[in-house]
Amino acid sequence: MTTQKRLYLPSESEEFKRTTRARLLEREVYFSTDPRDFGWVKENIPCQAACPALTNVPGYIRTIFEGRYGRSYELNRFANLLPGVLGRVCSRPCESFCRHGWEGNGEPVSICHLKRAAADLKNDGHRITEEMFGPSGRKVAVIGSGPAGLAAAHDLAVLGHKVVLLEALPEPGGMLRYGIPAFRLPRDVLAAEIGNVIRLGVELRTGVKVGLDVSLAGLMEEHDSVVIAAGTFDPNKLPVPGTDLEGVYTGLEFMMKVNAGERVEVGDVVQVIGGGYTAMDCARAAMRLGARRAIVNVLGTEEYLQVEKRELFEVKLERAEIRGLVTLSEILGDGKVSRVKFLRNRLGGFLPGGERNGVPIPDSDFEEPAGSVIFATGQKPDPSFIDVDLGKNERGWIKADETTHQTSLPGLFLAGDFMTGASNIIRSIGSGRRTAWKVDEYLMGAERKKMVVRHERAGVMRERSWDFVPRQAMATLKPTDRMAGEGSAEVDLGLGAEAALEESKRCYLCYLKFEIDPARCIYCRYCIDVAPKDCIKLARGVRFDADGGYAGIDETEEWNEVAVVAIDNKECIRCGKCLEVCPVKCIDVIKVELIEQSVNSRPARV
Amino acid sequence: MAGNHYVIIGNGAAGNKAAETLRKGDPEGRITVISAEPVHFIHRHRLAGFLAEEANIADLAVHPPSWYEELNLRLRLNQPVERVDFEDKSILLAHRERIKYDKLLICSGAKHRIPEYLSHFEKLLTKFSNGKHAIELKSMMPGIKRVTILGGDAIGLQLLNAFLPAGKDVTMIMDEYRFWPLESDAGSMDRLARALEAKGVKVVRNDHVTEVEKRGETKVVSTRGGVKVESDVVLVCSGMVPCLDFLADSGIDTQMGVLVDDKLRASVEDVWAAGECAQMYYEEIKDYRCQTGYQNAVRKGEKAALNALGADESAKLCEPGKLVVGGEEFITYGWKGFTLDETS
């Protein structure tokens, strides 16, 4: 780590001419590939950095505030392709990192609900925007039409390649269609957004099983490249006696039946094993199928489940139950499941995903009735259809290079959960898109898209009073209406325009960079006096990481050591109070956005 | 041991007994008792008696204010704890004051449980878990003719001692699977329902509430099975939940309550928990319990304090109490028990 002590750079110096400020003095917008600028984005826009698809969160929230819902939808779609879908079922890693949720700042912004608001509130006649490359003459097959496959197919089509999308099941969507229940993700929303991918010229072939109807080797011969995005369709079952009894399902098997419209006979009491979103979906679906009780049994405690608290509330609102500190030890029954045996647990250590383990207590067994048992204990990739020789990783899965996503067979790439194991939708989309770029590089012999940091002059875009706007609640369907009919009515009703506006005000707009120009600062410190947070500091200098990224401010309380008055953008809540009081107007506000750009072409996707 | 600052969160039976025990064991130590309540500690189990005119408000106080002075306890009433920083060994109060501790005893008790499926109607529901609730309900008593009790717990049964002799028309819509804190199965729930019916309570079983509406001054409770009950008061009696909001994301192990071992030690060093907020595994019943009841709180408060003073004493499951309704006996862990048979 180095400290750049001399922050005042003479305007005639070469060093000054390379700074963002100097470049913005010459023009309104400046694009950078300087590692320090990427480092700034990573450190200062935590929501975007946390998103596996690098969605421009402040950008799309600001456009909602401006009432430009279509633009907001597009800003989302540029990065994550399926805003209407993700606005409903994203695991929202961004919200855990939202600066508004940091200690003392209140609750995180409802980033996900705003994503849905953009999708819901855009005009019916909204026109989607794609910057298509010319036809490349190359042909790529993508196996699997789940989120990773759709993302790969989309980007490959945009890059001008002929894409064939193969789906083994009757409808496209993979886990989105067959794993998630309609009451969380309406099928018309899913179909519309899949349609936006297919109509780029992607040839969708459903009901085609690779390994049965066509061979992978054959696909490799017929195409210039093949991407396997076949997801994780091999469910785990725990090694306990009784798993072969009638009435024992895997979560995937159960949800596939439910999502295919089957009225599964679940019995009075449904015992769900596992504590992820699939487990919650299974319990909620079971209640809709007429179960009197659906109990989600987890090893650790509810607090550490990797499921959003609001989702847990909805599960319990529908009268399903969550029981912690139990381990399933046996499933009992005569041909059909009738009872289950558990052991009580003590709370154990942390598991890799952030959950807590449970350690069974000897001689603590107890039995309970069960009409059915559902194992929602995860899935893994099923490589049984692969008929070519490929390298394997330590888990026995097909191995691919972590950067290029290419397997040991040139031209064969992996994407999404098939490569990494079960993750989440947004991660799969991010993976699918990255794979597509790498396939393009493989096919065309050069990188044709890159990420750049766009800088634009801006001003204060917030009011201090907005910091006290409460998080807007999502309206939901009445419990009785949820269970009516087939139980497929959507539970979340969306934020209306008014609530979306209020929620959009809450965003700190962390993509705004507040910077004091040391050449003009007179060290009056008025800005420090009015700052509502400890965000403006007397400093010896600014620290940078070895890779050039911003690492923090080297503070001092000794007046004779002060080289600069610096704004700590990690603490800054972009209230603009400092600008109001600055007598010499030495504080610049710059909008910093991470965007995609075509190599050697004009800026795209601004 | 001199110079230790013991902080007790909670001014109930467990907290008071812990404070008394600590003072006995450490005459010089600083002891601070923090309570979110604005009033002194009262006997919660006598609140139903207060409603039934068997006790007056003065009878409910457990200790006079001078008790705290005599024991040299620093009592902080009406000071909700916002969070605990276990690494820093400090407590942040709602008004942003930070209090450091050397040893912490969490005795924060429990409050009424509002099941999630009733949460949408919470504003229309009457609760009964503290003195304020009791005073409010008592003021309403003359105007009440019809009472509906939702859920099922021993507090609700105690309240029958006030409602039935006063001639109130009582309907109980019972939870299907639990009757807090009774040891219940389908058979015992049936027996309880029959015993209550024999006493004149209308019991709705195998059904659940889907809606509570207000029509004029009347509240209408609807069930999935199509039952509609009109009431002047709808009481939610679905058991108690430990008061642990201030421990969210603090790093201490919790489930329903603060998870403690048999010495009442929490997962964090120098922290013990006792009373209704402490959750312990009991080999006798092969299950965890946040045990309730005055006797339990007193015993666990004492044990926790002794262990905080350096002892190594194990806590035990309190002997089961007995609840008698219509000649039927039901087991209740933690409560001493009571009978409904002497009132009607």
Image: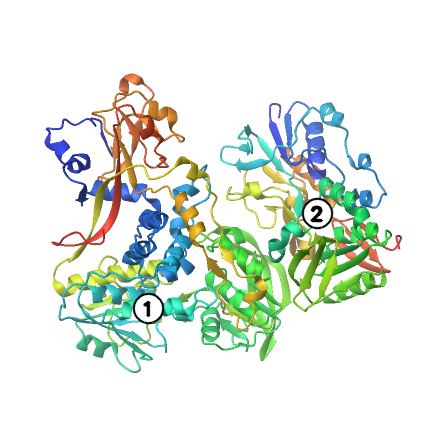
- Asked if residue A299 shows in the view, the reply is no
**2 or 1: mark nearer the eye:** 1
Q: Provide the chain ID for the residue under circle 2.
A: B
Residue drawn at (64%, 25%) of the image: B29
Q: Identity of the amino acid at label 2?
A: Lys
Q: Provide the chain ID for the residue under circle 1.
A: A
Q: Is residue A589 above or below residue A358?
A: above
- The quadrant in which residue A582 appears is top left
Q: Which residue is mark 2?
A: B316
Secondary element type, mark 1? helix
- The quadrant in which residue A207 appears is bottom left
Pick the residue in front: A183 or B41: A183
Q: Is B89 left, or right, of B111 in this rendering?
A: left
Residue most extreme to the bottom = A213
Q: Is B168 left, or right, of A452 in this rendering?
A: right
Residue drawn at (13%, 64%) of the image: A444
**Count of number-bearing discs:** 2
Q: Is B137 left, or right, of A173 in this rendering?
A: right
Q: Is residue B222 above or below residue A500?
A: below
Residue B262 percent coordinates (x, y): 64, 46
- Quadrant occupied by the N terminus of chain A: top left
User: Which class describes the residues within 10 Å of circle 1: few (<14), some (14-19), or many (20+)?
Assistant: many
- The quadrant in which residue A461 appears is top left
Q: Is A497 left, or right, of A604 in this rendering?
A: right
Residue drawn at (87%, 55%) of the image: B341
The answer to whether dots 2 and 1 both sit on one chain is no
Residue A194: give its label.
1
Pick the residue in front: A174 or A295: A174
Residue B243 percent coordinates (x, y): 62, 44
**Could you tell me how far apart the alpha carbons at marks 2 and 1 are, in whole angstroms?**
60 Å
